[in-house]
Amino acid sequence: MSRKKHKAVDFEDLDQSKDSSVFAKELEQFEQELKVLNEGEIIKGKVVSIVKNEVLVDIGYKSEGILSLDEFDNPAEISAGDEIDVLLENKEDENGMVIVSKRKADRTLGWEKIINNYKEGDTIRGRVTRKVKGGLMVDIGLDAFLPASQVSLRGAQNIDQYLGNTYEFMIVKVNIPRKNIVLSRRELLLKEREENRTRLLLEIEEGQMRSGVVKNIADFGVFIDLGGVDGLLHITDMSWGRISHPSELVALGDTIEVKILNIDRENMKISLGLKQKSASPWEGVDKKYPIGSKIKGKVVNIVPYGAFVELEKGVEGLIHISEFSWTRRITHPSEMLAIGDIVEAVVLNLEVQNQKIALGIKQTETDPWQGISAKYPAGSRIKGRVRNLTDYGVFVELEEGIDGLIHVSDMSWTKKINNPSEFLKKGQKLEVVLLSIDESSHKISLGLKQLTEDPWPKISEKYPLETEVKGVISKITSFGLFMELEKELEGLVHITEINLEPTMKLEDSFKVGDEVTAKVIKLDNEQRKIGLSMK
């Protein structure tokens, strides 16, 4: 409630002791001593008292002004006697009260200060006070609007974290008629980053050590903010040892020290290194692991062509699949090794410059092919088992890990064999003749027909040209008929040597098993072929 203030004048005495003219003069003088105040004017006032949520302010008028305690940012700090600026809103409302506002006075004074001292593009300091639709409000002496998109470099991301904090802002828009001000923190950050970028590019040099913050992590590496300029720390430059992902060593927001490896100022690209802070473990590795030496290591990776073995942190060697075993046929390294296995191997080759070490497991054992020639001399007869059949021949296992090849041409002296499966079966046991051995290449040539004497010299005597022969059709092809003259001896009747109507096919006139008569018209001793004619 407002209180009426009276001067030390006794109006009853005036009525009794003085005439009306004196009274009028005294009243006029009293009213003149009151301030002449206008609504909308900013006035200096003094806090008289605080009653509940209302503050009484002496503004030198006939009644104290009244305002809400909520208009103070820190109500607990207000006390009687404090001087404050208020704006006169109403000299006398319907209840006879004088209404004033501190917040509106602050806004008006703040606006005048901003207009007189700042312009668009200037920097001003303010405190983020509250969150509103589309952004934040900032106290810069009056409320100014900070759009969410202008809060940070990354835009509107969890803007609640900025509440209550004080920052520098750029004034980006001043609307004088509406008394609105729009701020941007992002513009200042961009400007600062560009300044830092320019300064950094002038200072930075290859070989320098620099601290930076992990900004982004990808499968191939890490982007480091060096203070306005981003550099790439590739995964291959993070550790001398093996890592599968950059997140094994760093996390977002980490501050790390890196080495400047390369600077492309034209394209603004900087290559960084972390492992280069320490010496390469490959230095002197040729002395630690000379060719021929035995080593122990841990299997750290398995690929279809071999296994990588870690000899020490940052130094790995490859055991190629061909170096796993002298005798076992390995189709995939996982048949013998698993990640984490500790293996013993022999250093086969070393390329320090290319950081490559070739290792072998089978070299830790004796090569069973050594001295194989003495064990299986050429011309000797050996028993074995058919292990595998191919289009060109048959592999016969003589002992575990030792195979020999019977080429299709060494299966029969007389019979034409198109595919070994016509002649032999997998797993079949048989006797063969050893034709030759190449120990260095691990190759053995075997023969099956060599078990018997070559019959061809006698065949050429038995079937001279123009001899009429009888036989059984053993095969019908598009180019003629094969006739079996005797066991494992065939002759070919070419289709041009058969009396056949143009519209007829061989299958229409002949069947396998039919007995037919023909005449020998060709003997090829070199190719061991007999040509026949039915004409």
Image (cartoon, rainbow, N blue to C red):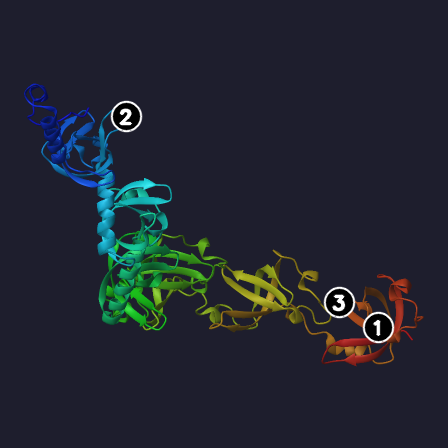
Q: Quadrant of residue 510?
A: bottom right
Q: Nearer the viewer, mark 3 or mark 1?
A: 1
Residue 117, given in percent of the width and then of the height, sits at 22, 55
Q: Residue at x 42, y 57 (%)?
A: 302
Of mark 3 and mark 1, the one earlier in the sequence is 3
Which mark, residue 363? none
Residue 325, given in percent of the width and then of the height, sits at 44, 61
Mark 2 crowd level (few <14, some 14–19, many ≥20, 10 Å Cα): few
Q: CA distance from mark 2 to mark 1?
A: 133 Å
Of mark 2 and mark 3, the one earlier in the sequence is 2
Of the pair 504 and 210, the residue shown nearer to us? 210
Mark 3 crowd level (few <14, some 14–19, many ≥20, 10 Å Cα): few
Q: Marks 3 and 1: CB-CB under 8 Å?
A: no
Q: CA distance from mark 2 to mark 3?
A: 134 Å
Which mark, residue 488? 3
Of the pair 201 and 332, the residue shown nearer to us? 201
Q: Mark 2: which amino acid? A: Glu
Residue that mark 2 sits on = 94
Q: CA distance from mark 3 to mark 1?
A: 16 Å
Q: Marks 2 and 1: CB-CB under 8 Å?
A: no
Q: Mark 1: which amino acid? A: Val
Q: Residue at x 25, y 67 (%)?
A: 200
Q: Quadrant of the C terminus?
A: bottom right
Q: Mark 3: which amino acid? A: Glu
Mark 1 crowd level (few <14, some 14–19, many ≥20, 10 Å Cα): many
**Residue 296 visible in the current orientation:** no
Of the pair 176 and 401, the residue shown nearer to us? 176
Q: Tag 2's secondary structure?
A: loop
Residue that mark 1 sits on = 493
